[in-house]
Image (cartoon, coloured by chain):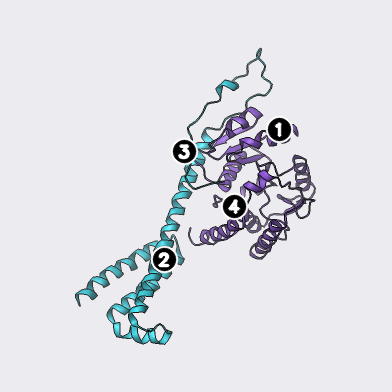
Amino acid sequence: MIIAAYNESAVLGRVLSDVLHCGYRVLVIDDGSRDATREVALRSGAIVVRHPVNLGQGAALQTGIDYALAHDADVIVTYDADGQHRASDIEGLLAAIEQEHAEFALGSRIRGRSTIPPAKRLVLQAATAFTRLTTGLRITDTHNGLRAMTRRGAAAIQLRQNRMAHASEILAQIAKSGLRYVEVPVTVEYTAYSMAKGQRIADAVMILLDLFVGKLYR
Amino acid sequence: MIAQIILSVLLVSVLFYAWAEYRRSPVVALLSLITTTAGLYFVWFPETSSQLADFVGIGRGADLILYTWACLSVLVVLNLHLKLRTQLELITVLTRSVALASAEPALMRDQNESAPAMGRLQKDDVRSLPVIAAPSASS
């Protein structure tokens, strides 16, 4: 299970205690944090890989995927560090992979019982419509940090978008791989902390620009 | 005539540059090729620039050349941006290898004093690594 964290020492301890309690092996990618993220992760019982400089969540997740593949992980789960996911949802993702023989299980807050703030719901709907149009994936949620992938699925992912556009890039690569995917209902809890750390509408525009520019060169 | 030759030499070197950039970014290279060829044409046939400007509704030929120049500047900026992204990808690969090479195992939460395991880290082992944060990047 991989968690990318940048200056998350305030909430990371609680997040890690939840997931470690469920018995998962956890890798924290400390993305060049300036606070005690690394120390908190190590003390909580997670393996820590540390970027010497801050690169962004996409880069951190790819580092995590590389580490997990090199250490013979069968299934890799990505999980946000800001405490908006529920550890109890992970089981549903793993069950979906096993029962539906899928290579990817994607968390969907739309299918779940999350109370999404209206402005966020609007941006999310636009992003989902855009993703459906550009990738052809039949999904109800994009930019949800909770997902699971098998070893085979993870090998098909090679993120080049270092920052937030990686969430769209991952979906594009899933579509391109042609591997089987399923959506699983999950609950996202919006706290004041996660909202402050979350995406704004201006970020959505930057994500679009990042995706466009990413296509202009090799 | 002197100005025409100097400008031509400059524009031809831009043509070569655009050709060399083709493999990295075909879009930027093609747009640069078109704009530079148009520039060369206007240098040698300035009178046609006025006709063309009139045709597209710009007014004066000099304005048309100014707009062409502005387009070329935008392309140069875009090309520089793409180069910076390529550099960032190299830095990412480098950073990733450094990070993976220095992965740290989890500290045992329930430390057993009587049976210290090989390679097990103690809480005091947590070192404070220096952090160099990029000024504007964030997760």
Q: CA distance from mark 3 to mark 1?
A: 28 Å
| Quadrant position of the N terminus of chain B in the picture | bottom left
Return the residue found at the far top.
B114
Residue B3: in sight, yes or no? yes
Q: Position of residue B47 (x, y in %)?
A: 30, 85
- Chain in purple? A
Which dot marks residue B132? 3
Q: Chain of mark 1?
A: A
- Chain in cyan? B
Secondary element under disc 3, as helix, strand or loop, is loop
Say few, some or many: other residues with alpha carbon within 10 Å of mark 3 (under 14 / 14 to 19 / 20 or more). few
Say few, some or many: other residues with alpha carbon within 10 Å of mark 4 (under 14 / 14 to 19 / 20 or more). many
Q: Position of residue A185 (x, y in %)?
A: 78, 51
Is A43 on the left-hand or right-hand side of B24? Answer: right
Q: CA distance from mark 3 to mark 4?
A: 23 Å
In the rendered structure, which disc, 1 or 4, sits on the residue that comes first in sequence? 1
Q: CA distance from mark 2 to mark 1?
A: 51 Å
Rendered position, A7 above or below A99:
above
Which dot marks residue A166? 4
Is residue B36 or residue A17 the one in the foreground? Answer: A17
The residue carrying mark 1 is A17
Q: Residue at x 66, y 65 (%)?
A: A133
